[in-house]
Amino acid sequence: MKRPGFFHGVLVAVVFAFFASAVITTLTPFFGFYSVIRLLIPALGLAYLMYLMSRSKARVGRVTTLSLWTALAAATWWVAPPFPLYLLIHVAAIWLVRSLYFYSGVVPAMLDLGLNALSLSATVWAITQSGSVFLAVWTFFLVQALFVGIPPTIQRKPAPAPNNAADDSNFQQARRQADAALRQLFTHQPTI
C-alpha cells in the first residue's frame, strides 16, 4: 500500500468523529459518560491502528503489534489510571506504532511525538471551547493527519568531497620519491 495522504486522513477524522459522537450520544444515558469514554478511546485507537497498518508498506510484526496493543489496552482499562494518563497511554501507543511502521530514524519519530502532543493540546482546546465530542475527536485526528508531512527519513547532507587533486599530487610525489630511493638502494653496489 502507499502512504496515506492528508485528505485521506481528513476523511478518517470525519468518520471517527461521527462514530464517537454517535456512540457517546447513544450509550451515555445507559452507562454514563465516564464508562463510555473509557471504552470509546481504545475502540478509536484500534480503528486507527488498523488504518495505519493497512496503509503501511511494512508487512512484518503486524500480529505482534496488534497483540501487544490489545494487551496494553486491556491492562490500561483494567488498572483504570486517571483519565489524563489513560489518554496519554493510548496516544503513546499510536505514536509508537506510527514510529515503527512509517519512520526509519529517531528525528522523524521525535517530530511525530511533537505532533501527538500538538494533537492532544488541540483536542483539549476544542473540548473546552465547544463541549462537543465530535469537534474534539475530529480535531485530534485532523492534527494526526498531518503525520504524512513528516519525511520517513531525515538524512544529513553529505560532507563535501576532499580535494582529491591535491591529495593525488602529494601521493604521487611521495611515490616517486620512494621509487627513486628504492632504485638507488638496489642499483648502488656496495664496495668491498
Image: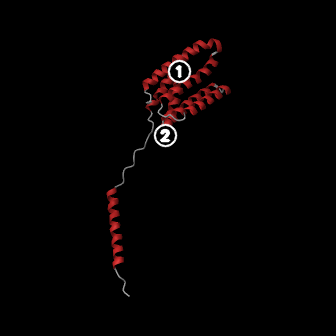
What is the crowding at mark 1: few (fewer than 14 residues within 10 Å), some, or many (at least 20)?
Answer: many
> Residue placed at 52% from the left, 18% from the top?
17
| As drawn, 148 above or below 168 | above
Q: Name the quarter where the C terminus is drawn.
A: bottom left
Residue bearing mark 1:
137
Q: Name the quarter where the N terminus is drawn.
A: top left
Residue 105's label in the rendered image is: 2
**Quadrant position of residue 7:** top left
Q: Nearer the viewer, residue 14 or 68?
A: 68
Q: Are marks 2 and 1 in contact (CB under 8 Å)?
A: no
Amino acid on which the number 2 mark rests in the picture: Gly
Q: Is residue 49 something one can see in this rendering? A: yes
Q: Farthest residue toward the bottom? A: 192
21 lies left or right of 176 = right
Q: Where does residue 28 sit, x and y in percent of width and height?
A: 62, 14
Q: Nearer the viewer, residue 188 or 28?
A: 188
Of pointers 2 and 1, the one earlier in the residue sequence: 2
23 lies left or right of 14 = right
Tell me the distance, in whole angstroms, between the alpha carbons under discs 2 and 1. Answer: 29 Å
Q: Is residue 131 something one can see in this rendering? A: no
Q: Where does residue 111 sit, x and y in percent of width and height?
A: 49, 35
